[in-house]
Image (cartoon, helix red, strand yellow):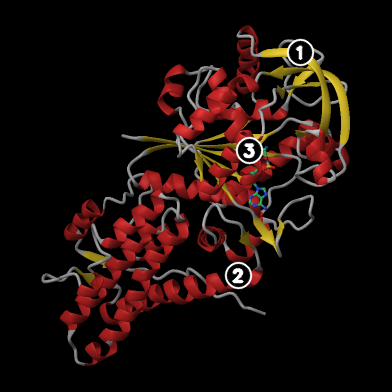
Amino acid sequence: MEKYYLTTPLYYVNASPHIGHAYTNVISDCAARFNRLNNKEVFFLTGTDEHGEKIKKAAEQAGVDTETFIEEKVLVFKDLWKKLHISEHFFIRTSQKFHVDVVQKAIKFLSDKGDIYKSEYEGYYCIPCESFWTKTQVQEAGGCPECKRNIEKIVEENYFFKLSKYSGWLKNYIRDNPDFIKPKIRYNEVVGFLENNSLEDLCISRPKRRVSWGIDFPLDDKYVVYVWFDALLNYISGVGFGTDKDKFKKWWPADIQFIGKDILRHHAVVWPVMLKALDIEPPRTVFAHGWWKIEAVKISKSKGNIVNPLELMEQIGADSLRYFLLREITIGMDGNYSWEGIVNRINSDLANDFGNLIFRVLNMTEKYFQAKVNCPVEWRVPPEFAPFVGDSDLKQAYMKSMNALDFPAALEKVWGFIKIMNKYIEDMKPWILWKEKDIEKLCSFLWSLLEGIRIVSVYIFPFMPRTACSIAGQLGCRLDESRISLDMSKDYNVYWTRKSFETKKGLPLFPRIDVN
Ligand code: MSP
């Protein structure tokens, strides 16, 4: 079985998660579930980034000790992922001992290799962004280039990692591996950056008198490890590096690492160099998605425009939120968040198109066949359904879009089938068949629709897992998460052996949202 290892960034625990964080995990979960459907063995890693001064400061502001503060925040993240049906295999925390050991061992290894040295650091450091900037960058931006806050100059002794030594290697690697950074716009951004800037060595220590919340620097007890150098290593410590050789060999290199575009340089420049220096292969792909914005402003704590996903889910449900996030923007692009946008999507795609289809079909099954439709002996796929059933055009188009992570395109194709089914009901006029007592035709008609809905439930599983399961339940089928597969020909055979759909109407799957 082919393996598929995917990761999300580790979220800072200085604040509760907002919709932007939820987005990264929702796209990752959709990819994880799709690859499982596609018969791959998947390992999905997410977690929390728990070091750095801003976390300690946030705890101070909240009037709690740092450990308690972190424990509380970690629970909020875990709770969110559970409610959003995120199917991670491991939730890593950078405070875990095995991870700390890996970070310290990595630094010792690099030091023995001659890739770490001590020197005076003079530069600009932004605490909220945990990032260093050069004088020119700060002058050009009039503050921190990332968050625009005022930024302080610091001069101090520190330990440096010889990033510059690997700049030639990195340029060649990126040139020879066009799939390493995706989408293309981000690939070009990194290539441009490397062409116009020479790589400077990376300061990887922080003096404890200034930054006390971090992993002890193994070469000098007056320092802690720079939080990014620590956090990036989670991607290997999380799959057994330093603890379980076989596990690491099985999963590394990561097949895809999802990140937001704001942390591209850390992942596409620093990270591959760290791995190269450690004699480890880089990940296959780093995929940078865009930002959710409100009226053109990035959603973030510092801008004060956050949307709380837990509150939003209480209003619209987890699967509807997942659907909105995955359907609304092409991954890689920025998207505009608005309540009107959510209402339109849910009312039109989910309540009108899909919810109505299921409601009508189940109603007819109850009314005409007492909720049990037996497989007609002479059943043939209706010609209108041919492009969608079994190993069909729909399957091919869906696979292509999903493999390219083009989630809106995949959903559009599936909705094409939903629309055809709605039209089929109008065209076939079942109420006339019923009046004319054409039971045989009516039975074939409903069988086709029930089978169509069952197929759709498989396709939407990566997007709306709970909904897919409850649709299957309403059709009297069981959607077994561990066995569900996109192998439609196999699945289709199941159809031939299945004798009936015994439906059980549940609560409306997608209640309409009142606009006012
Ligand atoms: N801790 C670092 C990552 C370390 S990975 C080894 C970090 N954490 S974060 O909590 O600030 O951000 C985590 C992710 O959330 C990033 O990928 C970031 O792009 C994403 N988002 C934060 N705000 C966002 C939006 N408004 N929209 C979409 N995603 C955004 O960076």
Tag 1 residue: 118
Q: Position of residue 180 (x, y in %)?
A: 48, 37
For the residues bearing labels 3 and 2, Cβ distance under 8 angstroms: no
Residue found 59% across the figure and 74% down from its top: 513
Q: Label 3 CB, ligand 1: below 8 Å?
A: no
Identify the mark at residue 438; answer none if there is no mark.
Answer: none
2 vs 1, front mark? 1
Residues at circles 1 and 3 in contact by the CB criterion of under 8 Å: no
x, y percent for residue 58: 82, 39
Q: How many marks?
A: 3
For disc 3, the neighbor class at 10 Å (few under 14, some 14 to 19, many from 20) is: some
- Seen from this angle, which residue lies furthest front? 196
Mark 1: few/some/many CA within 10 Å (<14, 14-19, 20+): few
Secondary structure under tag 2 reads helix
Q: Residue, x 35% and y 63% (percent of image)?
A: 456
User: Which label's residue is closer to the chain start, 1 or 3?
Assistant: 1
| SS type, badge 1 | strand
User: From where the camera sits, is residue 344 visible?
Assistant: yes
Residue most toward the top?
112
Cα gap from disc 3 to disc 2, whole angstroms: 35 Å
Three-letter code, disc 1: Lys
Ligand 1 lies in quarter: top right
Q: Position of residue 362 (x, y in %)?
A: 35, 74
* C-alpha separation, residue under disc 2 versus residue under disc 1: 53 Å
| Label 1 to label 3: alpha-carbon separation | 26 Å
Identify which amino acid the numbered label 3 is placed on: Phe
Identify which residue is drawn at 82% across, 34% down. Answer: 135
> Disc 3 marks which residue?
193
| Residue for badge 2 | 341
